[in-house]
Image (cartoon, rainbow, N blue to C red):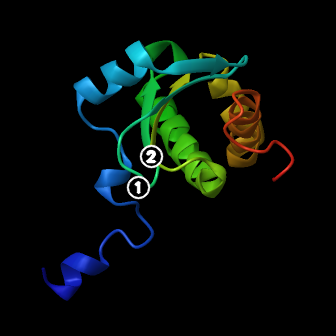
Amino acid sequence: MSEAAEGRGGGRRRKRGRLSRSGDFDRVFRDGRSHANRYLVVYSFPRSGGDEPRLGISVGRKVGGAVTRNQVKRQLREAFWACAGELPDGHDFVVVARPDVAALAADGGAPAVESELREVMAKAGLAEEGER
């Protein structure tokens, strides 16, 4: 791989930190545990292998148009990786955005989305709520 190709994407996450196959999503939905609040639903499933947590995001059309959905997905990714150090290794997570998250993201931005995500993770017993 050339130096130019390695330098692209700067702070981006490696692909393996994400769930990309529908089978992975299905397994987390089917066998995982869910916790929710007004804005988000978080499914978690422990997998074999102790590497870093993996993330899948689902943002439906009820959240808004394509631009809004992509902004919400970007903010959810940033929020998840900001608190990933507090999460257990070897887990798959799927974050499902509820329609009210669009207003939250527009009004409060990334800090508000991160706060809500941390709240759900703490409620699930996966992360400490006080560490913000």
Q: Are marks 1 and 2 in contact (CB under 8 Å)?
A: yes
- At a point 33% along the width and 21% down the height, the residue shown is 27
Q: Secondary structure at mark 1?
A: loop
Which residue type carries mark 1? Asp
Choose between 118 and 4: the one closer to the eye: 118
Percent position of residue 49, x then y? 36, 48
How many numbered tags mark residues here?
2
- At a point 27% along the width and 37% down the height, the residue shown is 20
Choose between 47 and 64: the one closer to the eye: 47
The single residue placed furthest to the bottom in the displayed view is 3
Task: Using the image, tell me which numbered label, if any, was put on residue 81.
Answer: none
Task: Using the image, tell me which numbered label, if any, was put on residue 51.
Answer: 1
User: Which image quadrant for residue 85?
Assistant: bottom right
Percent position of residue 112, x then y? 76, 40
User: Which image quadrant for residue 13?
Assistant: bottom left
Q: Quadrant of the N terminus?
A: bottom left
Percent position of residue 116, x then y? 74, 34
Which residue type carries mark 2? Gly
- At a point 29% along the width and 29% down the height, the residue shown is 24
Q: Give the CA distance from mark 1 to mark 2.
A: 5 Å
- At a point 32% along the width and 19% down the height, the residue shown is 26
